Image: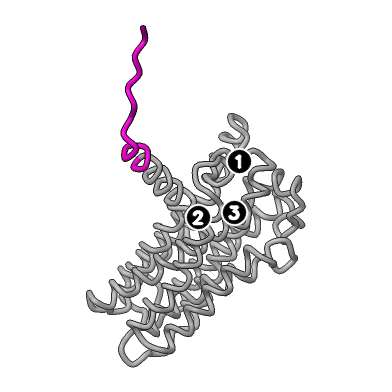
Amino acid sequence: MASSVARPAGNDQTSLMWRTVLGLVKASHPEPGLAVTTVAGLLAVAVGHRPAGTVAVVLTVLSSQLAVGWANDAVDAGRDATVGRTDKPVAAGAVSRRTVLVAAVLAALATPLLALTTTPVATLCYSVGLVSALLYDWPLKSTPISVLPYAVSFGSLPAFVVLALPGAPTPPLWLVVAAACLGAGAHFANVLPDLADDARTGVRGLPHRLGATGSRLAAAGLLLAATVALVLGPPGPPSWVGWSAVAAAVAVPAVGWYAGRAATRRDGRSVAAFRAVLVVALIDVLLLVASGRVV
């Protein structure tokens, strides 16, 4: 006679809890989220924040990245399921849409509270950036101005980091412009792998209207513009390190485009172009840290 052994109910609950936690981590878009948070932390060091100020900046940015990532997956759950995106936890059933939506709301509410540990004007600036990013998910994602939230939200990031300093100094215009160009470039690169899926589900943002080639050119041009602004914006002559960063801003997207084409031929989808944006962003912020010429 076969015997059965009942598993303790606690084991099932623990397993469910860890599946939910893992699903939330994956739904938060951890790779770009951690990249943006790291960039913010490095920038905080570059502009002269003390350790406590750097921690406040990092926690605020991390909270906003969680809010935006979770909101994106909650809003896109239906479309992701339609096109069979098994890499998306909500569409794959690893975590419920309601859970992700609640997490997004809590993170969004926590962001300005964390920002208030800096300065009021910095809190206002970053709250505008967060609202802009959330508006991308709905309703601006499918409009000709879909790039605008990326430009506004990325531009608000360095402005927040500078305004969070004691005395809330005015952020340099060249720094805000560079970040806005970087964010706009990220939008075009991020959409490239999803053009076909988005067409099936009715998404018609600016990259979809430009097409793959137009989006690649826009991404490359904006990334180069961002780096040039960081090299030429600060006072004094550009250094050889700066010109090296400009060369990297030309080479890295080209390599990412080539790698993306190869990966697409293999499995039909590649995020190499978006990873190229993350590499350029890291190079740019390291350039700022090395130059020491921010505020």
Residue at position x 45%, y 61% in the image:
66
Q: Is residue 155 above or below residue 206?
A: below
The magenta stretch is 1-14
According to the picture, the residue beneath numbered tag 3 turns out to be: 189
Chain-order first, disc 1 or disc 2: 1
According to the picture, the residue beneath numbered tag 2 turns out to be: 99
According to the picture, the residue beneath numbered tag 1 turns out to be: 85
Given contact means CB atoms under 8 Å apart, are the residues at marks 1 and 2 in contact? no
**x, y (%) of residue 169?**
38, 90
Q: Amino acid at mark 3?
A: Ala
Please state if 8 lies on the left or on the right of 263 as rendered: left
Foreground pick, 216 / 238: 216
Q: Mark 3 falls on what kind of element? A: helix
- Front tag of 3 and 1: 1
From where the camera sits, is residue 71 visible? Answer: yes
Foreground pick, 71 / 255: 71
Viewport quadrant of the C terminus:
bottom left
